[in-house]
């Protein structure tokens, strides 16, 4: 591989000078460090594969009669392993002259696989305006054109891979991850970029641990193992170059680390030689983005046709050959002699794996890139270059033409660059599916393509069977805290990462109907949260109904009152000619019994769902019927007093309060209440109202008073008549009569006043439907008081003591006792 071909273009009328076409390739194909604690050297056969791909591509271009016609490309391959070799190769490449006689300025450099070494090389090449094209240096830092103006690459920047990894973790809802990275530019820059993008996407990093192959290996490895065992995150991103990954996996084999979903970086995720039975607990189900598969016709046969005789001066080819076949070209007691005719098809290695090409396609495109740039450079029409519009040059200016390159290779790969020198990013999402013997099948389960529109860049295949890590048969959950369910709100804990939030139940009267809701929403006034506080339900409406026990009891009491009033009316009607009925003003008694029936019936209007008509009816009917009732009682009281006065000698007072006056007084008192009610209903009548202030969780459907003045005017008028009646009855309680009705009226008014005086504070303080119940109870109690005190003694005498129902008894003469 140390040979070099120099080819010069012939003279041409459109070309003013002869330009050497040389493509320099710094390859990392020589000695690598073994992946164990013991330092062992071996050849990197993957880099040899890259170098051979360069040769294959150059020869393919030179056979093309349309691309660079009449011109042949030359190349030289350098050993770029180690800083000294890298610096020597870079300086020799830009020197423009070497020991083999090729002179002229180098047109382009297809540079190192390592991002760190590519960075150093570009520092040398940038002042000389020599373009550097990398096939495998993925560090996002190299996209900075202010620092690396001559750097281009056919491999996507790690920034795209990192965005894809973030999208992958968002897709599977992996919000709590750990990172293990190597202490090199590629890993350190990639890890830092991933952490930054992950934070933007709401993904938290539990730990970020470096891995080293230096003297600190043991301590750092112990820290990694301890963290993996104690960590709560189930997803681990292994962001390392291939050589570090091999070292890491070799050292992790003896530790039983299970239950983790490993995600790999593009540098190692397709390397099948990493698989083994000992590593199955780590690599089974591993995922990551890889360079897309590509078909390069003829490359496989070319790679496998390599013989040491093809490169007799190359010590590297000989060394790789000896490593492949465990033989030696020099006599040795340890190994057999190599004859150089061994078949590479019998070897299993990175180099001989020609079933799929991924990174090799980037090498292929890099060489073609230089060829197309040279082709554009050499064009000259009417003294100017058609690409740049500048005068035809007599020296190589490949750098400027690379910026404008846009072509498609023979295998269909499109090549062009953005303003940062980056090509379009395309990745396959692969999944490691290992077998019991330790072999692995790397299955393509999706893709990430930056050329697709937003929302479609990351896509998972629908019909693909995915194997998950951690011996799980379903997607692993990796969150610091499970999402806050509906009914709770999410609160950030300032002492923990943003993913380790707290969940608090929504306060009373509020809900959250989404997962991880930041705020709780207040329910509308007519709604109240359910028990889970994840939805607002209509508040239950409360009112005193006939179906509930209290409503049924009060309804029954009202009906009993109506029945007793009716029964009393029947008794009085059937005995209307008896002295006790006649003596107690039968006309007022019947009117009083009628009003009591109305009072009992009035209580029923307070039960049931309030409506506009029921609200107006219940209060006005209550006010009018009770005034009618009290007016009758007042009339009876006045009659008693007048009757006593009339019994005095020379008194003719009864003519001033006869039946007509009694009727008029009852009518007048009642009409006054009717006027008050009409004014109340006209100005501001009662109406149904939803009271949502007393109870938070339910609505009280009640009758609002409308005008409070009207309500208290009705009550005050009833109270005034009751007090007047009580005073008159109290004055007449000791009148000489064996059956003095004033005593019973006094008791009835005493009960009536006591009930309604007690009603006021109870009415004001009772909540909800109990307010209505208190009002009904007051109506029933006062009505039963009137019925019981005024009519029960008379009925008792009529039915059980008929001997007392006589004029003599009423006149104070006690009849003889009967046995």
Image (cartoon, grey):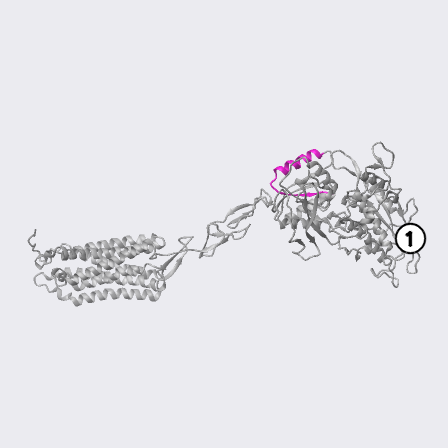
- Image mark count: 1
What residue is shown at x 68% (from left), y 33% (from top)? Answer: 219
Which residue is more in the foreground, 192 or 69? 69
Which percent across, then down, holds residue 43? 80, 40
Q: Residue furthest top?
A: 333
| Left or right of 125, for residue 796 | left
What residue is shown at x 14% (from left), y 58% (from top)? Answer: 798
Q: Quadrant of residue 558?
A: bottom left
The region drawn magenta spans 216-241
Q: Is residue 240 magenta?
A: yes
Which percent across, then down, holds residue 661? 17, 67
Q: Quadrant of residue 681?
A: bottom left
Mark 1, residue position: 8
Which percent across, then down, holds residue 504? 51, 46
- Tell me, yes or no, if residue 132 can be seen here: no
Q: Residue furthest left?
A: 816
Quadrant holding the N terminus: top right
Q: Is residue 280 magenta?
A: no
What residue is shown at x 60% (from left), y 41% (from top)? Answer: 232
Tag 1's secondary structure? loop
Which residue is more in the foreground, 760 or 25? 25
Which percent across, then down, holds residue 769? 35, 55
Which residue is more in the foreground, 125 or 238? 238
- Tell me, yes or no, if residue 678 can be seen here: yes
| Left or right of 147, for residue 278 | left
| Left or right of 617, for residue 61 | right
Which residue is more in the foreground, 539 or 498? 539
**Circle 1 residues within 10 Å: few <14, some 14–19, many ≥20:** some
């Amino acid at each position: 591989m140390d040979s070099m071909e120099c080819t010069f273009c012939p003279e041409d009328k459109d070309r003013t000078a002869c330009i050497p076409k040389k493509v320099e390739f710094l390859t990392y194909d020589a000695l690598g460090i073994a992946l164990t604690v013991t330092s062992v050297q071996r050849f990197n056969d993957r880099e040899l594969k890259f170098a051979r791909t360069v040769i294959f591509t150059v020869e393919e271009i030179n056979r093309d009669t349309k691309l660079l016609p009449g011109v042949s490309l030359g190349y030289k391959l350098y050993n770029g392993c180690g800083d000294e070799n890298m610096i020597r190769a870079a300086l020799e490449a830009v020197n423009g002259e070497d020991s083999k006689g090729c002179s002229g300025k180098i047109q382009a450099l297809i540079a190192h696989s390592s991002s760190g070494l590519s960075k150093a090389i570009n520092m040398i090449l940038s002042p000389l305006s020599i373009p550097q094209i990398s096939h495998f240096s993925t560090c996002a830092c190299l996209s900075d054109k202010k620092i690396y103006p001559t750097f281009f690459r056919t491999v996507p920047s790690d920034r795209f891979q990192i965005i894809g990894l973030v999208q992958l973790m968002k897709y599977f809802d992996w919000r709590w991850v750990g990172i293990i990275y190597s202490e090199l530019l590629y890993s350190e820059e990639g890890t830092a970029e991933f952490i930054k993008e992950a934070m933007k996407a709401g993904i938290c990093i539990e730990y970020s641990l470096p891995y080293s192959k230096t003297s600190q290996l043991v301590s750092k490895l112990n820290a990694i193992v301890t963290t993996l065992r104690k960590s709560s995150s189930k997803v681990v991103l292994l962001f390392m170059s291939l050589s570090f990954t091999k070292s890491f996996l070799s050292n992790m084999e003896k530790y039983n680390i299970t239950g983790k979903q490993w995600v790999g970086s593009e540098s190692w995720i397709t390397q099948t030689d990493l698989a083994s039975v000992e590593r199955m607990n780590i690599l089974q189900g591993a995922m990551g983005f890889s360079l897309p598969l590509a078909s390069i016709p003829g490359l496989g046969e070319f790679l496998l046709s390599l013989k040491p005789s093809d490169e007799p001066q190359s010590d590297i080819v000989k060394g790789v050959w000896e490593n492949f076949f465990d033989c030696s070209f020099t006599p040795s007691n340890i190994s057999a002699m190599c004859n150089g005719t061994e078949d590479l098809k019998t070897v299993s290695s990175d180099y001989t794996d020609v079933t799929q090409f991924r990174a090799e396609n980037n090498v292929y495109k890099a060489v073609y890139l230089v060829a197309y740039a040279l082709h554009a450079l050499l064009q000259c029409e009417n003294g100017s270059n058609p690409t740049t519009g500048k005068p035809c040059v007599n020296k190589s200016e490949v750098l400027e033409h690379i910026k404008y390159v846009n072509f498609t290779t023979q295998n269909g790969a499109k090549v062009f660059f953005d303003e940062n020198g980056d090509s379009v990013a395309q990745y396959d999402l692969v999944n490691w599916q290992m077998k019991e013997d330790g072999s692995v099948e790397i299955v393509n389960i999706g893709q990430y393509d930056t050329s697709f529109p937003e929302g479609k860049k990351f896509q998972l295949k629908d019909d693909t069977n995915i194997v998950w890590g951690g011996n799980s048969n379903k997607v692993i959950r990796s969150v610091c805290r499970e999402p806050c369910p509906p009914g709770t709100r999410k609160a950030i804990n300032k002492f923990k990462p943003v993913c380790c939030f707290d969940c608090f139940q929504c306060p009373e009267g509020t809900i959250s109907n989404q997962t991880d809701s930041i705020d709780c929403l207040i329910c509308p006034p007519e709604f109240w949260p359910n028990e889970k506080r994840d939805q607002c339900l209509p508040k239950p409406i409360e009112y005193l109904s006939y179906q509930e026990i209290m409503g049924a009891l009060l309804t029954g009491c009202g009906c009993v009152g109506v029945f007793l009033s009716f029964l009393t009316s029947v008794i009085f009607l059937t005995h209307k000619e008896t002295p006790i009925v006649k003596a107690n003003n039968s006309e007022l008694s019947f009117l009083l019994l009628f009003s009591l029936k109305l009072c009992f019936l009035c209580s029923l209007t307070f039960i049931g769902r309030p409506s506009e008509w029921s609200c107006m009816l219940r209060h006005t009917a209550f006010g009018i019927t009770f005034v009618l009732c009290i007016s009758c009682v007042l009339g009876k009281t006045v009659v008693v007093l007048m009757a006593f006065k009339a019994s005095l000698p020379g008194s003719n007072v009864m003519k001033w309060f006869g039946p007509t006056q009694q009727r008029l007084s009852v009518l007048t008192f009642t009409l006054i209440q009717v006027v008050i009610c009409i004014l109340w209903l006209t100005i501001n009548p009662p109406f149904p109202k939803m009271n949502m202030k007393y109870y938070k969780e339910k609505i009280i459907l009640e009758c609002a008073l409308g005008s409070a003045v009207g309500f208290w005017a009705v009550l005050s008028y009833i109270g005034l008549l009751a007090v007047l009646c009580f005073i008159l009855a109290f004055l007449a309680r000791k009148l000489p009569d064996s059956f003095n009705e004033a005593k019973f009226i006094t008791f009835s008014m005493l009960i009536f006043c006591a009930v309604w005086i007690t009603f006021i504070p109870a009415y004001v303080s009772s909540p909800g439907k109990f307010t209505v119940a208190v009002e009904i109870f007051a109506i029933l109690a006062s009505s039963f008081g009137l019925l019981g005190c005024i009519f029960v003694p008379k009925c008792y005498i009529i039915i059980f003591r008929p001997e007392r129902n006589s004029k003599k008894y009423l006149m104070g003469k006690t009849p003889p006792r009967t046995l």
